[in-house]
Amino acid sequence: MNRLARRLTPRTLRGRLSLVALTTAALLMTVLTVVFNTVMDRHLKHQADDELRNRAAAVATTVDTSGPRVRVLETVNDSLLDTNVWIYSGTRLLEKPPSATVGSTLTRAADRLAARGSPLCATVRTGNPRLVRLCSQPVSGPRNTATVVTAADLAPYRNSAGTLLSGSLILDAVMLACTYALTRLAVGRALRPVRTMTDQATLWSTVGSDQRFGAADQPAELARLGTSLDALLDRIRTVLRHEQQLTGELSHELRTPLTRIVVELDWWRARPRSAAETDATHEVIAEAAQSMRTICDTLLNDAREGAQNTTTAVGATAVAPVLRRLVEDLDARNRLKTVVDVPDQQIEAGVASALLERIVSPLLANAVRYADSTVTVSARRHAGGVRIDVTDDGPGVPEEFLDDLFQPGRRADSGDGHDGAGLGLPLARRLARAVGGEVSHDPGHTPGARFLVDLPAG
């Protein structure tokens, strides 16, 4: 039964609202039809009683109760007045309709009404489905009392009631059909803005659009819906932006170790190599692969923890070994002079080793990309934490580009012949801020560029 009800229930909100409106209208019309027909039936019955009493009053004018006996006077319209009329003197029958017999159903009913001696009405069934209505009217005199009983066939009144019932049922059916059609039309028009908003939200969520619905000039319900959809679109756009950022950062960070692997393989294939050279190539490839794995783990963990609104796991890392390892990798691939200046070898930063590499590596790569001859990396204690400086002797950052320096995907001159996607500096700042640190640029340093990394102490 429940399964059948579920299958018959409309699947659309428009259909369900139309069904609810139709059901409500059907119940209301049923009640109104019952009440209307009950009232009309009572009205027709009262109308019949009024007609019978009027006839009884007319007949009573022909009854003389002033003498010793009750007499019925003859009149011009006596035949019309005597139709379906019984006249009694007390309980004694004086006159009856020509078609009625003494022991008939109507005569016995008239006898009972006359015996009561008060104005009464009763309905008698003389045949199926024939019904007759009888009313008694006492006629009092100074010496005698008479009773006039009149009768009328209820068939015309029942026909009128049946006609009214049929007409009301037909009207109900027409009203229900109109109600259903108008409700579907009205609900469809009312839900049209919702469908439009749904289609727009689907499109905007796919492309990450900046467009929003807003709550101005909207009904209260649509305003709340628009506000909810705007919040959902903002979250979707944030997720899409994070995905794009993560993809760009992975591509940016993995480019260097992947290039090392490709270069080593090309060098190894160029001519036959000794076993020692082959082992060295394998070691470089393994180191680059491990670096790629570390990069993936660091960025993915940061993205995952950032989505959960938590900070990156804190550790304690000696700064000097990490900086020397990064510089050695740079020296192996570049002609530049790279200097590491860490007076205090015991300095520790309060971050994990892999995260420290990911913060400093983009700054070193940027310095090597634009330096003329020398890159300097230094680390010192500063304001209760650790400060790492990355300095180069290149042309420096153009003044007009300072506001966009840490914006993802922005480069001062995309046609300067240097590779890069403009993601390294934003990545370094984002990772540093995730652990309570900061990456900034020193605009007062000349010549070249100087970037400052502030991290909590380990």
Image: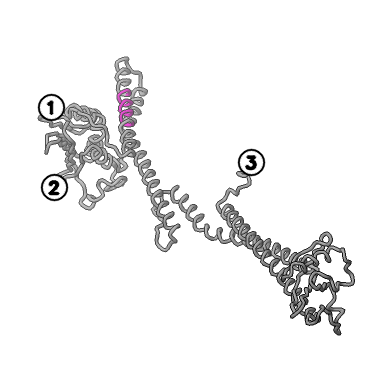
Residue 302 appears left or right of 65: left
Q: Residue 141's x, y, as percent?
A: 75, 79
- Circles 3, 2 touching at the beta carbon (< 8 Å): no
Residue 71 appears left or right of 303: right
* Magenta part, dominant SS: helix
Mark 1 or 3, nearer chain start:
3
Give the residue number, with chain letter if any, for mark 3.
Answer: 1
User: For the residue marked with disc 2, what is the amino acid?
Assistant: Gly
Query: Magenta region: which residues?
Result: 285-296
Residue 170 appears left or right of 245: right
User: For the residue marked with disc 3, what is the amino acid?
Assistant: Met
Q: Quadrant of residue 104?
A: bottom right
Provide the secondary structure element on which disc 2 rests.
loop
Q: Residue 159's x, y, as percent?
A: 78, 66
Q: Is residue 80 above or below residue 118?
A: below
Q: Quadrant of residue 248?
A: top left
Q: Quadrant of residue 117?
A: bottom right
Q: Nearer the viewer, mark 1 or mark 3?
A: 3
Instruction: Name the residue located 87 percent from the left edge and 63 percent from the top edge.
Output: 103
Give the residue number, with chain letter if any, for mark 2.
Answer: 444
If the image is split into quadrants, where does the N terminus sit? top right
For label 3, count other residues whose C-alpha is less than 10 Å away and answer few (under 14), some (14-19) or many (20+): few
Mark 2 vs mark 1, CA separation in Å: 29 Å
Q: Residue 300's x, y, as percent?
A: 34, 34
Instruction: Name the residue located 44 percent from the left edge and 61 percent from the top edge.
Output: 219
